Image: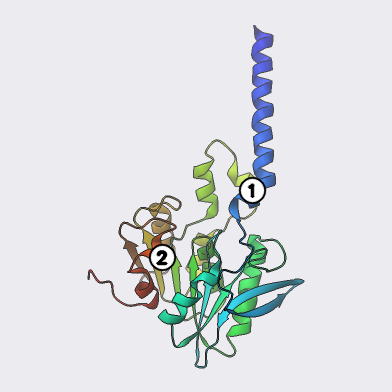
């Protein structure tokens, strides 16, 4: 009986270790879901050379001092937002970055790579457009918070943001040592205290991906008086942009129920 118990424990240990190895090896395929094509073929494309990679950016040209930089979700074709953003921000040049491996951009996505590309895009845009607003949605909120902590952005908007990806992953895989396995942690809590731009956080009331408490925790990381927190009612994580409140909030207009 002891031998049977020993073999059972050994088999369970091997199975557990195998799952840990699988999670480690395939974690980026769970976090990043690249969209190969561009939904909006009419977009003007800026090719940003960063390190050895070519990063494609869907753009709408502008002629004033304002620009909008947008960083999307982990499975988003950001080019499809170009029309809405062009209408919502008529006085701004619009830049929607396709992450490495997305929409024709070369390379493979990682936290370090996306942070580097975001800085490179800002440094390309800022000399011509000194008033840069930054919007980050879901995964892109982690990129946006980092960028705003490193560069003088005019305004920061975070849509369905998290305190950290590590926290979300640990909740999804509670029986595994996520802290030790995770390569891309996107610790927005670490960078939020360094942000000096006015910040708007938009949460979805029925978010099934990013718990509200994670967005609220991130809110507490910013300097006091800097951040506004808004919840869009009856909105889910992926459908939040379908709400009639969404685009006006991005622009900074008051809500209709206020």
Residue under numbered circle 1:
27
The one nearer the camera, 101 or 181, is 101
Q: Single out the residue that lies furthest toward the bottom.
A: 63
Residue drawn 66% across the image and 61% down it: 109
> Which residue in the rendered view is the most extreme toward the front?
41
Q: Nearer the viewer, residue 189 or 18?
A: 18
Up-down relation of residue 5 to residue 212 (above or below): above
Task: Give the number of marks.
Answer: 2
**Can residue 149 be seen at all in this image of the molecule?**
no
* Residue depicted at 67% across the width and 72% down the height: 55
Q: Residue shown at 50%/68% (left/top)?
A: 136
Which scheme is used to colour this image of the protein? rainbow
Asked which secondary structure carries label 1, the reply is: helix
Q: Quadrant of the C terminus?
A: bottom left
The residue sitting at the left extreme is 258
Q: Earlier in the sequence, mark 2 or mark 1?
A: 1
């Amino acid at each position: 009986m002891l031998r049977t118990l020993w073999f059972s424990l050994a088999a369970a240990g091997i199975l557990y270790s195998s799952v840990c190895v699988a999670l480690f090896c395939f974690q980026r395929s769970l976090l990043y879901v690249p969209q190969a094509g561009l939904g909006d073929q009419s977009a003007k494309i800026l090719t940003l050379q960063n390190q050895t990679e070519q990063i494609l950016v869907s753009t709408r040209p502008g002629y004033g001092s304002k620009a909008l930089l947008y960083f999307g979700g982990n499975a988003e074709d950001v080019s499809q937002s170009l029309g809405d953003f062009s209408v919502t921000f008529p006085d701004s040049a619009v830049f929607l970055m396709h992450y490495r491996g997305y929409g024709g951009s070369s390379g493979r996505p990682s936290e370090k790579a996306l942070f580097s590309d975001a800085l490179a895009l800002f440094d390309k845009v800022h000399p011509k457009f000194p008033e840069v607003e930054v919007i980050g949605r879901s995964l892109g909120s982690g990129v946006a918070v980092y960028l705003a902590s490193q560069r003088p952005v005019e305004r920061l908007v975070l849509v369905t943001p998290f305190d950290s990806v590590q926290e979300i992953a640990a909740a999804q895989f509670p029986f595994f040592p996520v802290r030790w396995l995770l390569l891309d942690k996107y610790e927005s809590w670490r960078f939020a205290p360094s942000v000096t731009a006015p910040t708007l956080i938009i949460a979805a009331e029925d978010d099934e991906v990013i718990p509200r408490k994670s967005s609220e925790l991130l809110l507490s990381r910013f300097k006091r008086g800097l951040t506004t927190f808004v919840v869009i009612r009856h909105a889910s994580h992926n459908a939040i942009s379908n709400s009639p409140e969404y685009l006006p909030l991005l622009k900074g207009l008051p809500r209709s129920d206020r």
